[in-house]
Image: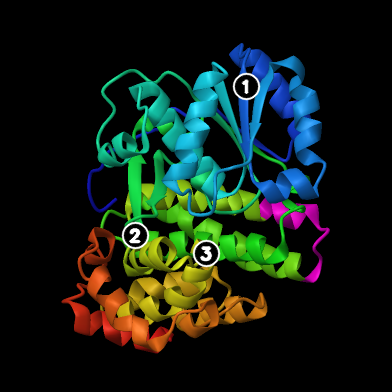
Amino acid sequence: MSHAFTYEALPQERVHFGNAVRDALGAEIDRLGAKRVFLATSKTLRNESSAISLLATTLGSKCTAIFDGITEHAQLATVMRAVDVARETKADLLVGVGGGTIIDGLKVVQFALSEGIGSLDELIARARSRPTKPNAIRQIAIPTTLSGAEVTQFGGGTDSARGMKLGFGAPQLVPQVVIYDPALGSLTPEWLWLSSAVRGVDHCCEGYLAKNITPVYEAGLLRALSLFAASLRQTKKAPDDLFARLDSQMAAYLACSNFARAGSGASHGIGYILGGRYGVHHGYSSCVMLPHVLRWNAQVTAERQKQLSAALGRAGMSAGGAVAELIADLGLPARLRDVGIKQDQLPAIADEAAKHPVVRSNVRPIAGVSDLMTILQAAW
């Protein structure tokens, strides 16, 4: 071991891998003694599948509300509406069924309920602040994508008036229980499942190269990367292979739980801007930015990047090239122009990114707008 470090465990009690969601959820509700459950999900999942009605049946009279109004990128105005409904129904437990938008949105709901926040302006003013009161409510997360939001203590929401992603964080915001059911994941549209997985690949790569990396985190990130490389290609070829989907879910868990402790860099930082201000899905932002940030960082991380290439099953290829090949194999967008970014928008993105703390934590120092324009032009 090269140096001493402290591993900070989060208060997450149980993670179910591969159990049927109805069985696991019912057992957890009973174990936790919840009586008034607030269930949040997306409109698509609620309206285009039977999954939510089946879960509501499982909960029975304990389900006090089904809320499907949290919009993409967890727009804080819609999160605040969820706060109001959860408060009105006197919820004692939150259940999030969906991707990162739903699960992160409920973390913000937790924060607002515990802190007694009653308005959108008050919520925005409290972003990035620490809780001042004991946590009053927890979440069971049932992910349907591979974003990894279910294993972190950080939740984000977008202030639409300013086009900014705002963060909320505290150990008790991590979901108390996670239920990974690959059958539920098979309901997710292919583009969303696969692109959210590339977000997980981004977690692995930037986390492995980050300044706070430790041997414990390294092991989880490299194993996650190898699971992603094989399972995603198999899912693309055989969408009904639930074993491949479960491997991807295990990869998402390993990737995000270790990356969140190690740190990230410019791909994530630029992605927050692309999402908050330009509406680019986080998975797509990783598709279009990660290969180019890896190539930029290779000047100072070339030796470590060899481990990333090996984990991706492409020893001898550059890490940027190996990630780009995976994205191409999955049929996902590879350029900024493919996700609606215009070339004349690049200077504004570069200017904002130059001030972003996550971009400034990049393993290869980014001096300013000029360096960012080099990366963005390569990605465009």
Ranked by sequence position, the earlier of labels 3 and 1 is 1
Answer few, some or many: residues within 10 Å of disc 1's Cα (few below 14, many 20 plus, some between 14 and 19): many
Ranked by sequence position, the earlier of labels 1 and 2 is 1
Q: Of 173 and 178, which appears nearest the observer?
A: 173
For the record, the magenta segment spans: 237-247
- On residue 306, the disc is none
Secondary element under disc 1, as helix, strand or loop, is: strand
Q: Name the residue under label 3.
A: 281
Q: Where is residue 160 in the image (x, y as percent from the top left)?
A: 39, 54
Answer few, some or many: residues within 10 Å of disc 3's Cα (few below 14, many 20 plus, some between 14 and 19): many
Which callout, 1 or 2, points to the residue nearer the camera? Answer: 1
Q: Distance between the residues labelled 3 and 2?
A: 18 Å
Where on the picture, by quarter, is residue 29? top right
Q: Residue at x 61, y 11 (%)?
A: 33
Q: Name the residue under label 1.
A: 37
Q: Where is residue 165 in the image (x, y as percent from the top left)?
A: 36, 54
Q: Mark 2 points at which residue?
A: 264
- Locate residue 318 relative to residue 182 in the image: left or right: left
Q: How far apart are marks 3 and 1 (CA)?
A: 29 Å
